[in-house]
Amino acid sequence: MVTWEQHLGQAEEWDEYASALSGGFYQTHDWGQVRRLAGWQSLPLVARRGGQVIAAANVLFKRKFGLTICWVPGGPLGDSTTLNSEFREAMGNALGSKFFYCRISLLRADIGNEAVLLSRSGWRRPTVTMSTGIIMSYALEGDESERLRRASGNWRHNLKRSRRHNLRIEQWDNPDPFAISALYREMESLKSLPEQHSMAELKAIFMQCRERLVTYRCLDENGRLLAIRVAGLCGGFTAMDLLAAAGVDARKLYASHATLWALLNHCARLGLTKYDLSGVDPIGNKGVFDFKRGVGSNTVECIGEWEWASVPGLCQAVNWWVTRKGT
């Protein structure tokens, strides 16, 4: 018999569960704390069978207009057969709400007909999704020369070009959120992008998640910041792309190639086996897709986003809200 219950233990214990269940960065305790800036509260739930934790969900929630909106980024983790009515009942009881909506986002490939199981358990695909459901996965096995051979000829050529410009690529032990924020604003202006990460969010990420981050930066020969890339460590085997920004001059100097390659080499030295290059949009943002694919990563179509609501019409209302406000 499987029972869901609220996790009342320490943050370290929660992260041990998440790691054991092959969890991603977005299901860690620290990421839940970062999302408080956007008004989300954290509700950690675990499923046990015979005393053993077999699934976990760090549920983020907001209360709006008498309703509770729940979001499980990168999860739930573990046995998907537990994502049934008992899971939703336990969530509602812990929230103290009969009127709630939940959206989950499973960032893993469907290798066991999990989508069919979810559909049979009452979940449905949202009409408006917040991502494509496609990620890029990079294998860290092999030495540097072997991994470099897996990259495309064009990607290798651009990496070689970066070495002609006296760039300084280094691990950044004490990242400056102000400098990183300025670099993001420069990139957003260059590419006509909306704000990717606010100053407050960047400060929270580096303060709250410091112990599980690896940050690399690229400086030009005059010491000017050109590009940064930040990985979030997920247990002892994987890392995930968390932040990436490049300024106006980075492209012509191939700074992003040099920075990513240095970070991947660092993760390989740590003994990690996989680097999650995060989500891509092959059609809407082909440049980023080609860059991530070019380094030698593989495309993974994830199980993706599913939703459920306790009252009729709530799914439609939330999907409309997502088109207006996002998360």
Image (cartoon, rainbow, N blue to C red):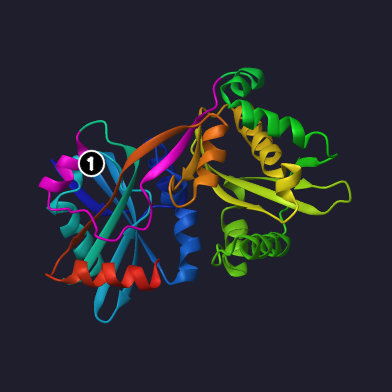
Residue 276 at x, y percent in the picture: 49, 38
What residue is at 49 percent from the left and 50 percent from the top?
Answer: 285
- The residue that label 1 is drawn on is 80
Residue 254 at x, y percent in the picture: 72, 41
Relative horizontal placement of residue 302, taking residue 165 as reference (left or right)? left
Q: Is 253 one of the magenta-colored residues?
A: no
Q: Point out the stretch of residues depicted in magenta.
A: 113-141
Establish if 294 lies above or below 229.
above
Which quadrant holds residue 152? top right
Q: Nearer the viewer, residue 227 or 213?
A: 227
Establish if 62 lies above or below 142.
below
Q: Quadrant of the C terminus?
A: bottom left
Q: Quadrant of the N terminus?
A: top left
Q: Is 137 one of the magenta-colored residues?
A: yes
What residue is at 63 percent from the left and 32 percent from the top?
Answer: 155
What residue is at 50 percent from the left and 62 percent from the top?
Answer: 34
Residue 296 at x, y percent in the picture: 54, 29
Q: Nearer the viewer, residue 135 or 15?
A: 135
Q: Nearer the viewer, residue 170 or 132?
A: 132
Relative horizontal placement of residue 253, taking residue 319 as reference (left or right)? right
Q: Nearer the viewer, residue 122 or 226?
A: 226
